[in-house]
Amino acid sequence: MRLAVTASEGPRAQSALQAIAGAHDWVNPEDADALVVLGGDGFMLHVLHEMLDIGRILPVFGINHGTVGFLMNKAKSRRTIAERIERAKSIDVVPLCMNAATNGGKEHSYYAINEVSLLRETRQTAKLEVNVNNKLRMAELACDGVLVATPAGSTAYNLSANGPILPLGSNMLALTPISPFRPRRWRGAILPDKSQVSFRVLEPEKRPVAAVADQKEVRDISEVSIAVARDRKLTLLFDRGSSLDERIFAEQFQV
């Protein structure tokens, strides 16, 4: 198997990179069958976004040399990296595509692996119109913000905003309000991932709103549409017994 490797700039990841330099005949990413990523979850997301932007997507095996390592495998193993990858379980993750239009008429398109968030820019509450599949579902949502999360991202910002955890393979999206003021008791919705979700900003000059696709931010938006990007499917590789779907399932029993 032709493997490439990349590492974050953190000292732990750089030390691990030096340690495995002679453990495999590494090739350049453009010639590889799979990519080994050394670092933490933040660096893994960075690498995945680079692949989405370039359009050449490889299966990725992450090794945790960061903090949490939710998207990564454990660093210690009795097997070689090549053996671990050959035995690995593959998990498909489908990102979201966000198309955002600004008040100035500019359009931006970004991918999100975890979630797309709309957030108020000032102390003024955001007011948003919510549409699903071109049908008006909520004429006015007053809130600090709202997000649309994938199953892979449902345990991140979405969970912190009291949104539901979505198992991988559920083919669902979480639509979760952030500190809703009106309607106060609205808890959000769970939508089929075939849905197209769009928001229109009400009173955009008085109540400016930013849209964020993972780390990419567009300020002063007027409208945003969000849909699953099936042509950009990502494949993550995990040691058997500790794959991403099991971790997301286990999160539902955390207290």
Image (cartoon, grey):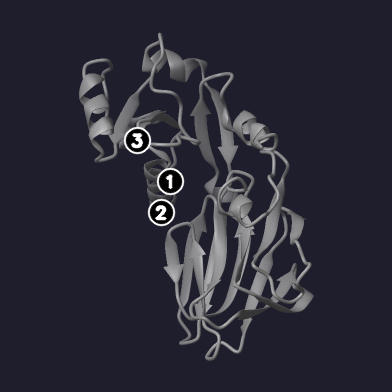
Where the C terminus falls, by quadrant? top right
Which of discs 3 and 1 lies nearer the camera? The answer is: 3
Q: Is residue 28 visible?
A: no
Label 1 Cα crowd, 10 Å radius (few <14 / some 14-19 / many 20+)? some
Question: What is the C-alpha distance between the residues marked 3 and 2?
Answer: 20 Å
Residue 20 in picture, x, y percent from top left: 26, 20
Three-letter code for the amino acid on which mark 1 is drawn: Leu
In-front residue for pair 87/32:
87
**Pointer 1 residue:** 45
Classify residue 76 by image quadrant: top left
Residue at 53% over, 48% down: 232
| Residue at the extreme front | 255
The reply to whether callout 3 and callout 2 are in contact (CB within 8 Å) is no
Three-letter code for the amino acid on which mark 2 is drawn: Asp
Residue 81 in picture, x, y percent from top left: 38, 17
Please report whichever mark, 3 or 1, sits nearer to the chain's N-terminal start: 3
Which of discs 1 and 2 lies nearer the camera? The answer is: 1
Image mark for residue 39:
3
Question: What is the C-alpha distance between the residues marked 3 and 1?
Answer: 10 Å
Q: Is residue 117 left or right of residue 14?
A: right
Element type where label 2 sits in the image:
helix
Classify residue 207 by image quadrant: bottom right
Residue 213 in picture, x, y percent from top left: 50, 61
Image mark for residue 53:
2
Question: What is the C-alpha distance between the residues marked 1 and 2?
Answer: 12 Å
Label 2 Cα crowd, 10 Å radius (few <14 / some 14-19 / many 20+)? few
Label 3 Cα crowd, 10 Å radius (few <14 / some 14-19 / many 20+)? many
Please report whichever mark, 3 or 2, sits nearer to the chain's N-terminal start: 3
Residue at 69% over, 60% down: 175
Residue 254 in picture, x, y percent from top left: 65, 35
Three-letter code for the amino acid on which mark 3 is drawn: Gly
